[in-house]
Image: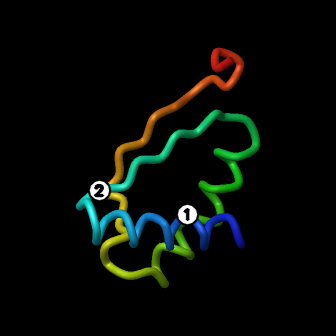
Amino acid sequence: RALARLVAQEAAAAGGERGRFTLGLSGGSLVELLSRELPPALREARPEAQPARWVVAFCDERLVP
């Protein structure tokens, strides 16, 4: 829940400041956790946090030095 709230807060800050929020997800259990916990956190967040303002990239951390 804490991670989902942090993502929602960062999304609201970025959405208000830059008009968009960029999120990179590496997969695994993180995606499952956020898919469960993020919707309730977004319902409580400021309008700037809404996913319509997001750019989501799926990443593979094994390819990063």
Question: What's under tag 2, amino acid-wise?
Answer: Arg
Using the rendered view, name the quadrant where residue 38 is placed. bottom right
Nearer to us in this view, 13 or 29: 13
Identify the residue at horizontal 43%, vertical 64% (top origin): 11
Q: Position of residue 8 (x, y in %)?
A: 50, 69
Quadrant where the N terminus sits is: bottom right
Q: Is residue 50 left or right of residue 5?
A: left
Question: What's under tag 1, amino acid-wise?
Answer: Val
The image shows a total of numbered marks equal to 2
Q: Secondary structure at mark 1?
A: helix
Are there few (<14), some (14-19), or many (20+) residues within 10 Å of tag 2?
many
Q: Position of residue 35 (x, y in %)?
A: 60, 55
Q: Position of residue 41 (x, y in %)?
A: 55, 75
Distance between the alpha carbons at the discs numbered 1 and 2: 13 Å
Identify the residue at horizontal 40%, vertical 48% (top origin): 22
Q: Is residue 44 left or right of residue 47?
A: right
Residue ID for mark 2:
20
* 23 shown above or below 35: above
Quadrant where the C terminus sits is: top right
Are there few (<14), some (14-19), or many (20+) residues within 10 Å of tag 1?
some
Asked which colour scheme the image uses, the reply is rainbow
Residue ID for mark 1:
7
Identify the residue at horizontal 31%, vertical 78% (top origin): 47
